[in-house]
C-alpha cells in the first residue's frame, strides 16, 4: 500500500451514523472494514485504464462544513411549480445526502406508495428495506461502493406496491456542497409486481471555482423491478465545474419486467458513472439510452452493463457522446450472457461526435457470451462531423456555425425526445447554450 493510499481509511463510524438498527450498524462496520482492507483499483486495468482512482479519494478530517450554491433554490422552485401544476407526482430534495425533504408523498401514500427518507423507512418499513438494501451495491461491487455503503448519512426510499402505477414522474433533486465538501447519496427503489413509475434523478451543485478545493460526490442507486413492472429511470448529471462524481447504479428486473435507463451527463470536472441492469428472469427487457455532452477540460468515464442471467431476455444500449474544446470521454460497455441464458437478444451502440481537434473519445465494447443460442451485436463510431453534411447545408444558404448546430441537434434529438416534460425544456436549453459556444 503506498503512502497516499494508506492515508485514506475510515478510522471509525461517526456517532451520527450509529443510529438505526443493530443490523444496519453491523453492515456499516462490515463495509468500513472492507474499504480499509481493500486496495485501490490498479490504474490501467480494465475499467480504470482512463481514470486515476486517487481522484475520488479524500481526507475526511480536512472536509469543510457543507454549504450550497444559491441557485439551488431556483431549481427547487421550478420543480415545485411543476408539482403544483400536476406535471409531477412528487419532488424529493436531497442536500448533501443529509437533509431529505419529500413533497407530494402524502397524496401518494393513499395509494400505498411510499416516498420517504431511508432513515424514516428503516423505522416504519424495516422488513421491506432490509430485504432490498445493499443487495446490488455493496462491498462486493468495489472499493468506492464499500465507502458509500459505510458512510451514507441518509438517503431516499421509493416503493410502489403491486398493480399500482404512478402516472407522473417523481423528481429527485440531489444537491452537492461547495468547495471541499463530501457527500454520499443513497437511493433504493422497489417496483412491485405490475407496478410502474418514472423517476428523474438530478444531480446538481458542487464547487464552482476551479481554484478552490473540489467537492466530492459518491452515489449509489439500487432499483428492483418485480414481475411485469415498468420502470423508467433518468439520471441527469449537471454538476458544477469543480466537482468529482462517482456513481454506481444497479438494477435487477424479473419476469416480463421492462426498464428504461437514460443517463445524461453534462457537468462536473471529472465523473465516473457505472450503470448496470441484471435481467433475472425470462421476458425481462432493458433499454439504455445515454447522452453525454462535454466541453472545456471535462473528463467522463462511463461503463454500462447488461447481465443476462436468464434466457429469453432482451437488452439494447444506445450511448451518444458529443465533445468539443478539450473534453475527454471513455465508454466501456459490457454484455454478459450466462451459459443457461438461451435465446437472448442483446444490442449495443456507442457513437462519438468530435466537434474540433483536441477532443478525445475511447470506446470499448465487450461481450461475454457463454452460449451460442443468442442474437448479439455491437458497434462504435468515433469521428468529426461529416464535412459533406456541412457542405450540403451551406449550399442552401446556412452558415457553418448554424450547420454544425443543426447536425448536433439532430444527433441528440432521439435521446432528448424520451425525457419527461419537466426536464426536457431545461435540457434542450442546456444543449442549445453549449452549441452557441461552438
Image (cartoon, helix red, strand yellow):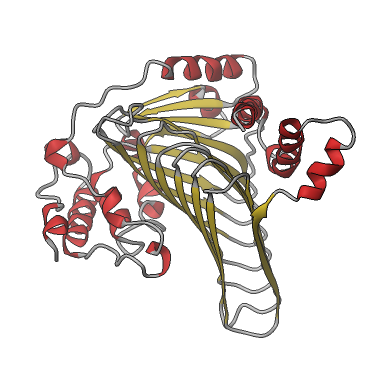
Q: Residue at x 23, y 57 (%)?
A: 31
Q: Residue at x 52, y 22 (%)?
A: 104
Q: Nearer the viewer, residue 129 or 12?
A: 12
Task: Residue 69: give x, y in percent of width and height.
Answer: 36, 20
Q: Residue at x 21, y 45 (%)?
A: 58
Q: In which quarter of the view is residue 32 placed? A: bottom left
Task: Residue 117: give x, y in percent of width and height.
Answer: 37, 33
Q: Residue at x 56, y 38 (%)?
A: 199
Could you tell me which quadrant the C terminus lies in? top right
Along the horizontal axis of the image, is 87 left or right of 16? right
Q: Nearer the viewer, residue 226 or 419?
A: 419
Count up the numbered dots: 0
Task: Residue 92: give x, y in percent of width and height.
Answer: 46, 27
Along the horizontal axis of the image, is 417 left or right of 364? right
Q: In which quarter of the view is residue 432 placed? A: top right
Question: Can see residue 318?
Answer: no
Residue found at the far right of this picture: 396
Task: Residue 421: give x, y in percent of width and height.
Answer: 67, 28
Question: Can see residue 430?
Answer: yes
Amino acid at each position: 500500500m503506498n503512502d497516499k493510499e494508506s492515508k485514506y481509511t475510515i478510522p471509525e463510524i461517526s456517532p451520527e451514523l450509529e443510529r438505526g438498527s443493530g443490523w444496519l450498524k453491523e453492515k456499516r462496520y462490515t463495509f468500513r472494514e472492507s474499504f480499509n482492507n481493500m486496495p485501490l483499483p490498479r490504474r490501467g486495468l480494465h475499467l480504470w485504464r482512463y481514470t486515476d482512482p486517487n481522484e475520488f479519494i479524500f481526507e475526511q478530517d480536512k472536509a469543510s462544513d457543507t454549504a450550497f450554491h444559491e441557485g439551488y433554490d431556483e431549481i427547487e422552485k421550478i420543480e415545485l411549480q411543476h408539482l403544483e401544476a400536476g406535471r409531477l407526482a412528487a419532488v424529493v430534495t436531497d442536500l448533501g445526502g443529509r437533509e431529505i425533504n419529500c413533497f407530494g408523498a402524502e397524496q401518494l401514500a393513499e395509494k400505498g406508495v411510499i416516498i420517504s427518507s431511508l432513515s424514516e423507512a428503516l423505522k416504519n418499513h424495516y422488513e421491506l428495506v432490509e430485504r432490498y438494501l445493499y443487495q446490488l451495491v455493496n462491498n462486493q461491487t468495489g472499493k468506492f461502493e464499500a465507502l458509500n455503503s459505510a458512510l451514507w448519512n441518509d438517503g431516499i426510499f421509493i416503493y410502489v406496491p403491486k398493480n399500482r402505477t404512478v402516472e407522473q414522474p417523481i423528481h429527485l433533486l440531489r444537491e452537492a456542497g461547495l468547495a471541499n465538501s463530501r457527500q454520499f447519496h443513497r437511493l433504493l427503489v422497489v417496483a412491485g409486481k405490475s407496478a410502474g413509475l418514472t423517476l428523474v434523478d438530478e444531480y446538481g451543485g458542487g464547487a464552482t471555482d476551479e481554484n478552490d478545493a473540489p467537492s466530492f460526490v459518491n452515489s449509489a442507486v439500487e432499483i428492483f423491478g418485480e414481475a411485469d413492472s415498468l420502470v423508467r429511470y433518468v439520471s441527469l448529471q449537471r454538476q458544477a465545474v469543480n466537482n468529482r462524481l462517482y456513481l454506481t447504479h444497479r438494477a435487477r428486473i424479473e419476469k416480463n419486467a421492462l426498464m428504461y435507463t437514460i443517463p445524461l451527463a453534462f457537468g462536473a470536472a471529472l465523473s465516473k458513472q457505472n450503470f448496470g441492469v441484471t435481467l433475472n428472469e425470462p421476458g425481462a427487457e432493458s433499454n439504455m439510452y445515454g447522452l453525454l455532452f462535454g466541453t472545456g477540460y471535462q473528463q467522463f468515464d462511463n461503463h454500462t452493463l447488461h447481465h443476462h442471467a436468464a434466457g429469453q431476455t432482451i437488452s439494447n444500449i444506445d450511448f451518444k457522446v458529443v465533445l468539443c474544446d478539450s473534453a475527454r470521454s471513455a465508454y466501456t460497455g459490457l454484455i454478459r450472457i450466462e451459459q443457461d441464458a438461451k435465446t437472448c437478444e442483446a444490442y449495443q451502440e456507442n457513437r462519438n461526435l468530435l466537434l474540433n481537434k483536441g477532443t478525445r473519445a475511447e470506446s470499448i465494447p465487450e461481450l461475454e457470451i457463454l452460449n451460442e443460442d443468442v442474437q448479439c451485436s455491437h458497434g462504435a463510431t468515433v469521428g468529426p462531423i461529416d464535412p459533406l453534411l456541412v457542405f450540403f447545408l451551406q449550399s442552401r444558404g446556412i452558415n457553418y456555425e448554424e450547420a454544425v448546430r443543426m447536425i448536433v441537434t439532430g444527433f441528440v434529438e432521439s435521446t432528448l425526445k424520451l425525457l419527461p416534460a419537466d426536464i426536457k425544456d431545461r435540457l434542450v436549453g442546456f444543449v442549445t447554450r453549449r452549441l452557441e459556444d461552438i
